[in-house]
Amino acid sequence: MLIGALCAAPADAQAPEAELFALGVDMGAQFPDTAFEKTLTLDAIGEYYLTPRVSVRGLFGWASPGFENRTEDHFRQFMLLFNGVYNWDVGTPVFPYVTAGAGAYFVRELLDGLNDPDSEARGGINFGGGAELFVGDLASVKTEVRWDVVSHPTGLPDASSFSLTFGYKRYF
């Protein structure tokens, strides 16, 4: 599907403009600390363009990796992130971008057959980059890599991770 969209992208597709608002969804893989198994990650995004090149973005994400060799136990994570995004116009419908920001990571161990420990909120930073391909005047598909560096209290699981996602964004 993504390859078809790449091949069918119109040459006159719109670039981001100042004061545009966008909503999007991403789905992909999260590669957490070695204590955990790789897992699905889902993100919902709201983005506002301050200029054609600069935007601010809010992201709400979810992942629930299983503990390595104990897949019935999970380390559920909700993320509320705020980022700045900078994109480049390279003269094609594809716009590469970089992003950096900070946010709150709400984590909880879910243990099968045992009382679950209390949830906790941790602070963290994230950075990454990707490419967005306009497939119409007000729609795009995108891919992104993101590294989340999350505070790690001694003796507790590390919520830091690397993510690779693919998604869809609609402009308003």
Image: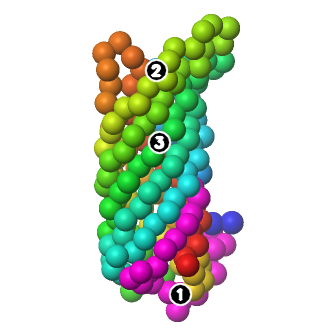
Disc 1 element: loop
Relative to 69, does residue 136 appear above or below in the rendering? below
Give whichever of discs 1 and 3 has the lower sequence position: 1
Q: Position of residue 10 (x, y in %)?
A: 58, 87
Q: Residues within 10 Å of mark 1 (few under 14, many from 20)?
A: some
Q: Position of residue 116 (x, y in %)?
A: 57, 14
Q: What are the residue bounds of the magenta stretch?
A: 3-26
Residue 87 shows in this picture: no
Relative to 111, does residue 23 appear above or below in the rendering? below
Quadrant the N terminus occupies: bottom right
Q: Are marks 1 and 2 in contact (CB under 8 Å)?
A: no
Left or right of 135? Residue 153 is left
Q: Amino acid at mark 3?
A: Met
Separation (CA) of disc 1 from disc 3: 32 Å
Q: Nearer the viewer, residue 114 or 167?
A: 114
Separation (CA) of disc 1 from disc 2: 44 Å
Residue extending furthest toward the bottom: 12
Q: Is residue 9 magenta?
A: yes
Relative to 94, does residue 144 appear above or below in the rendering? above
Res 13 label: 1
Q: Is residue 170 magenta?
A: no
Q: Position of residue 154 (x, y in %)?
A: 30, 15
Q: Position of residue 83 (x, y in %)?
A: 35, 57
Res 79 label: 3
Give whichever of discs 3 and 2 has the lower sequence position: 2
Give whichever of discs 1 and 2 has the lower sequence position: 1
